[in-house]
Image (cartoon, grey):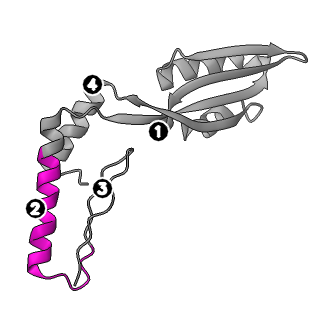
């Protein structure tokens, strides 16, 4: 019977046990490790980060206003630029939390009636989470509703 503590990764801290026949001692050790890591992270004043992605949308000029406006409201980002090309086509480049950007493909198709499309969603960096979102995650973690 073996317990395993996984390696630390800069993007996530994961402690897991495989309890295929794990002894009571192994389970207690794994719980002690989880508790120690939870306490250390709480006391260290850890800044939670989330992945951000570059988003590129292309479509006809008629869809420009709705898509840019929705991007600003839904994503909450003012980090964008719009280029206007020949033939009445626009390209919007923006930066958004990856969690918000992932479902943006369907949003763009809906807003443009299928005429515009997300050309790229590429994870580019990590940014500190908004304090309120970070505090909510920490509360979930401390209450045991969110585990490592």
- Is the C terminus in the top left, top right, bottom left or bottom right quadrant? bottom left
Q: State the CA–CA distance, disc 3 to disc 4.
A: 22 Å
Image quarter for residue 69? Answer: top right
Name the residue beneath numbered marker 1: 99
Q: Position of residue 27 (x, y in %)?
A: 13, 73
Name the residue beneath numbered marker 3: 14
Q: Which mark is residue 91?
A: none
Category of crowding for the residue at label 1, using alpha-carbon neighbours closer than 10 angstroms: few (below 14), some (14–19), many (at least 20): few
* Circle 3: element type: loop
Horizontal relation, residue 114 to residue 126: left or right: right
Mark 2 vs mark 4, foreground winner is 2
Image quarter for residue 57? Answer: top right
Category of crowding for the residue at label 4, using alpha-carbon neighbours closer than 10 angstroms: few (below 14), some (14–19), many (at least 20): few
Seen at 26% across and 26% down, the residue is 132
* Circle 1: element type: helix
Closer to the chain start, of discs 3 and 2, is: 3
Q: Which mark is residue 32?
A: 2
Q: State the CA–CA distance, disc 2 to disc 4.
A: 29 Å
Mark 2 vs mark 1, foreground winner is 2
Seen at 60% across and 34% down, the residue is 107
Horizontal relation, residue 78 to residue 67: left or right: left
Q: State the CA–CA distance, disc 1 to disc 4.
A: 17 Å
Disc 1 + disc 4, Cβ < 8 Å: no
Horizontal relation, residue 87 to residue 42: left or right: right
The residue lying toward the viewer, choosing from 64 and 25, is 25
Mark 3 vs mark 4, foreground winner is 3
Q: Which segment did they paint magenta?
A: 18-39
* Circle 4: element type: helix
The residue lying toward the viewer, choosing from 13 and 61, is 13
């Amino acid at each position: 019977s073996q317990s395993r503590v996984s390696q630390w990764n800069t993007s996530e801290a994961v402690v897991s046990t495989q309890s295929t026949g794990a002894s009571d001692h192994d389970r207690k050790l794994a719980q002690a490790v989880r508790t120690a890591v939870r306490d250390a992270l709480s006391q260290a004043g850890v800044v939670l980060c989330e992945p951000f992605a570059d988003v590129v949308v292309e479509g006809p000029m008629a869809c420009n206003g709705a898509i840019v406006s929705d991007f600003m409201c839904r994503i909450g980002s003012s980090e964008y630029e719009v280029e206007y090309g020949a033939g009445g086509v626009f390209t919007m480049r923006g930066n958004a939390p990856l969690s918000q950007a992932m479902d943006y493909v369907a949003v763009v198709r809906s807003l443009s009636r299928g005429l515009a499309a997300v050309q790229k969603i590429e994870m580019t960096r990590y940014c500190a989470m908004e304090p309120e979102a970070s505090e909510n995650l920490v509360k979930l973690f401390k209450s045991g509703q969110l585990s490592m």
